[in-house]
């Protein structure tokens, strides 16, 4: 049995994802480990919001996990790998967020950026209503649509930083999610119910996953910036 058909497959994908940002967290210029005090509660809040949705979606069959590619330990109907996914992926992306801030001068978000944000927020809300019979599509289009409308209202200074990070993170996203959804393998670790998605895919990744990822990362960064502002001394 090869790596791509192994019960440790999901674990290995997550390990490879985590190892570089974890080691580089102690790099003398970045000192990212000092930000963990803000990141850990941010991950907790994000998981408090999105893990129950993940559990519900698994229970009602929006997606399922391939037992041949997971170890087999479940917590509240989710494999342990899925719990780790919610920690490792945002952790790695916040690392990217901090690296980009360190090495690049990112312009502050303009009025036009916020207008575009509002436009996409309203568009996603309308699409959520249009695709009401596709649960995964409707729920996360609706959640992100509302989030973008709120972003336009509060106009956070970090919004351009987040968008830059998300654009850069799309490269590892395509690789990691591609591995988990069977884009490069004969089997997928995560199997989607075709009736609950609109069927548009990037490689073998449902387009909904890009929205799902955006919302999870947005929740994490939002909380991260809040805790930094509130508890920095």
Image: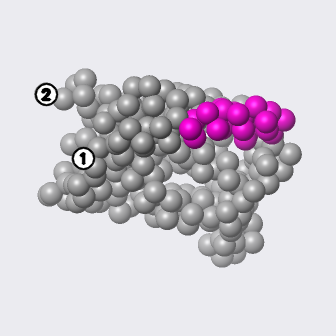
Task: Report whether residue 125 is seen.
Answer: yes
Give the position of the N terminus as an image quadrant.
bottom right
Location of the C terminus by quadrant is: top left
The residue under the point 71% across, 64% down is 204
Examine the rendered structure and indicate whether residue 185 appears above or below residue 53: below
Q: Which residue is pictured at 35% across the width and 63% down the height?
A: 20
Residue holding disc 1: 33
Which residue is pictured at 78% across the width and 41% down the height?
62
Badge 1 vs badge 2, beta-carbon distance below 8 Å: no
Q: Position of residue 218 (x, y in %)?
A: 46, 39
Image spot of residue 8 (x, y percent): 60, 61
Q: Closest to the observer: 195 or 120? A: 120
For label 1, the SS is: helix
Left or right position of 31 against 115: left
Circle number at residue 131: none
Rendered location of residue 57, percent (x, y): 73, 36
Q: Nearer the viewer, residue 71 or 49?
A: 49
Query: Residue drawn at (46%, 57%), measured in percent from left and top?
Result: 167
Above or below, comparing residue 50 to residue 174 in the picture: above
Dot 1 crowding, Cα within 10 Å, few <14, some 14–19, many 20+: some
Q: Position of residue 27 (x, y in %)?
A: 20, 59
Which residue was labeled with disc 2? 233
Q: Is residue 1 magenta?
A: no
Q: Residues within 10 Å of mark 2 (few under 14, many from 20)?
A: few
Question: Does the rendering let one see residue 57?
Answer: no
Tag 2's secondary structure? loop
Name the quadrant containing residue 180: bottom right
Earlier in the chain: of badge 1 and badge 2, it is 1
Label the magenta part by its dominant secondary structure.
helix
Span of residues in magenta: 119-142
Q: Nearer the viewer, mark 1 or mark 2?
A: 2
């Amino acid at each position: 049995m090869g790596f791509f058909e192994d019960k440790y497959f999901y674990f290995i994908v997550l390990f490879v994802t985590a190892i570089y940002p974890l080691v580089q967290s102690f790099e003398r210029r970045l000192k990212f480990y000092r930000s963990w005090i803000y990141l850990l509660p941010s991950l907790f809040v994000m998981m408090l919001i999105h893990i129950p949705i993940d559990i519900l979606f698994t229970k009602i069959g929006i997606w399922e996990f391939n037992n041949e590619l997971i170890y087999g330990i479940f917590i509240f109907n989710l494999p342990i790998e899925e719990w780790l996914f919610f920690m490792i992926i945002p952790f790695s992306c916040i690392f990217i967020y901090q690296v980009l801030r360190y090495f690049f001068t990112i312009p502050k978000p303009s009025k036009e950026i916020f207008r575009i944000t509002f436009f996409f927020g309203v568009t996603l809300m309308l699409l959520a209503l249009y695709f009401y019979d596709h649960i995964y599509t409707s729920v996360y289009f609706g959640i992100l649509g509302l989030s973008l409308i709120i972003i336009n209202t509060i106009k956070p200074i970090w919004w351009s930083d987040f968008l830059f990070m998300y654009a850069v993170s799309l490269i590892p996203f395509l690789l990691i999610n591609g591995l988990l959804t069977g884009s490069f393998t004969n089997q997928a670790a995560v199997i989607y119910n075709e009736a609950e998605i609109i069927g548009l895919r990037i490689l073998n990744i449902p387009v909904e996953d890009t929205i799902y990822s955006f919302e999870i990362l947005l929740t994490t960064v939002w909380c991260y910036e809040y805790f930094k502002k509130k508890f920095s001394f």
